[in-house]
Image (tube, rainbow, N blue to C red):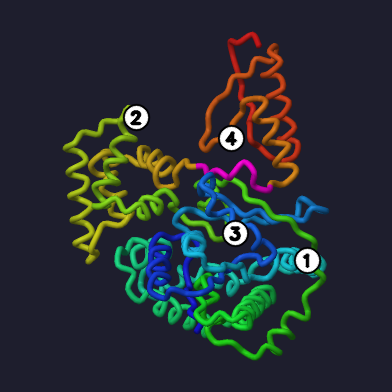
Amino acid sequence: MTTILGIRHHGPGSARSVLAELERLQPDALLVEGPSDASDLIGLIEDPAMRPPVALLVYAPDEPRVATFYPFAEFSPEWVALRWALEHGIPARFIDLAAGAQFAVAKTELERRMAAGTPDDTVEEQIRHDPLTELAKAAGEEDGERFWDRLVESRRDPGDLFAAVSEAMTAVRGAIPEAETLTLQREAAMRRGIRQAAKDGFTNVAVVCGAWHAPALDKLPSAAEDARTLKTLPKAMKTAAAWVPWTFDRLAAESGYGAGIESPGWYAHLWSGAEPLAVSWMARVGALFRQEGIDASAAHLVEAVRLAETLAAMRGRAVPSLSELNEAVRACLAMGSDLPLKVVRDRLIVGQVMGETPPDAPVAPLAADLEQLTRRLRMRPEPGQKTVDLDLRNETDRSRSHLLHRLGILGIHWGQTQQVFGKSG
């Protein structure tokens, strides 16, 4: 028996549903959408020094610029599933098309598009990339993120989530069939991984994949048909893999990450399960406001919680979502101004959190060199921004300046120069 669990890549409600389903199914093998050439690094997830958010970096050693990241947060369904498998001694594998093959396909496709002068995205491709917005519009709402958040991520009771998600994605794919070659090849590779698990003797297999792929993995075509799809792949590039620290702001959609979410910090709060959520969230907002010198009395916070709960009830929602909480903060704490809400968004809704990886985990050569330099110069990477005064008469500060300028030449703008007045160095 094979059970397909279609999820959103970073969502606490999806993660909670996956965890509940794994406890119910008690599978003897776990298959996860992820590059098959990085399966050897799954075991490091249970290392106590591994603290998400982190990302799986897969790159071509011969062409270091050719690389891709697979981020994971504590509330990512894949992360939760892999940790569950490791804790229960269940074999776990990545079954997506190998990153080396995806690199080769992407290179070939880029060359073809540049030669033909075709646009990167059609309307159909944009809908496939973001089906949630289309589902929200069909339900009479404009914001796909908040629509999915209210129906899935903010729910405490998972219910029969996966059947509903599969049905919705089947409807969208029926209206706009998948035509992107790489996606079809990836799905053929994942089906091949499912068949391989059956050949290896596993009889109760759980598959965690993106919701868009769930209908394509639910019913397997013939192995010969998938073999024909994969036969057209170019020669795969040689790859290496490593775990690297990640940050919440790079999980955010505004960073350009394709599977990004709007509110990593809010989702982390949902995953923490601090009940009642509205009260615990307002407590964090109040602490932040006081830290920033903004008035936030206990009375302000009580009225904000009451307003958020009233708005949710008027809209027919069981609990306040982030929309109601933001409106309550604006009305009761920010006195109608959006400026304090920007602080809330940067520090709490998106969040300034950075993960850690074990010191003995594999790293890319350039990353290892940078880590050695930052340790020697006492420039520990951390989330957020801060101003650093560098006295160029000091050897250490001069070396720090050299490092930041070298990174800038490479297009890594870790440090940005500022105009300084009234200082002699």
Instruction: Report the predominant secondary structure element of the magenta stretch.
Output: loop
Classify residue 226 as left or right of residue 347: right
Q: Answer whether residue 149 is visible to the viewer in this image.
A: yes
Q: Is residue 414 covered in magenta?
A: no
Q: Disc number at residue 381? A: 4
223 is higher (above) or lower (below) than 128: below
Cα separation between marks 3 and 2: 40 Å
Q: Nearer the viewer, mark 2 or mark 4?
A: 4
User: Along the line of sight, which residue is nearer the eye, 203 or 339?
Assistant: 203
Give neighbour class at mark 4: few <14, some 14-19, many 20+ (Cα, 10 Å). few
Q: Is residue 357 magenta?
A: yes
Q: From the top left corner, tell me how far across and down residue 33 is, in percent.
A: 58, 68
| Side of 148 relative to 220 (left or right) | left
User: What x and y, as percent, mark residue 157?
Assistant: 30, 67
Quickly name the residue at label 3: 42
SS label for mark 4: loop
Residue 291: give its label: 2
From the viewer's perspective, is the residue at label 3 or at label 2 nearer?
Answer: 3
> In the image, what residue type sits under mark 4?
Pro
Mark 2 or mark 4, which has the lower sequence index? 2
- Tell me if mark 1 has few (under 14), some (14-19) or many (20+) residues whose alpha carbon lies within 10 angstroms of its own: some
Residue range of the region highlighted in magenta in the rendering: 354-362
Above or below, 339 relative to 243: above
Q: Are marks 3 and 1 in contact (CB under 8 Å)?
A: no
Label 2 sits on what residue type? Gln
- Residue bearing the label numbered 1: 104
Q: Residues within 10 Å of mark 2 (few under 14, many from 20)?
A: few
Q: CA distance from mark 1 to mark 4?
A: 32 Å
Q: Position of residue 279 (x, y in %)?
A: 24, 47
Residue drawn where x is 66% and y is 37% of the image: 413
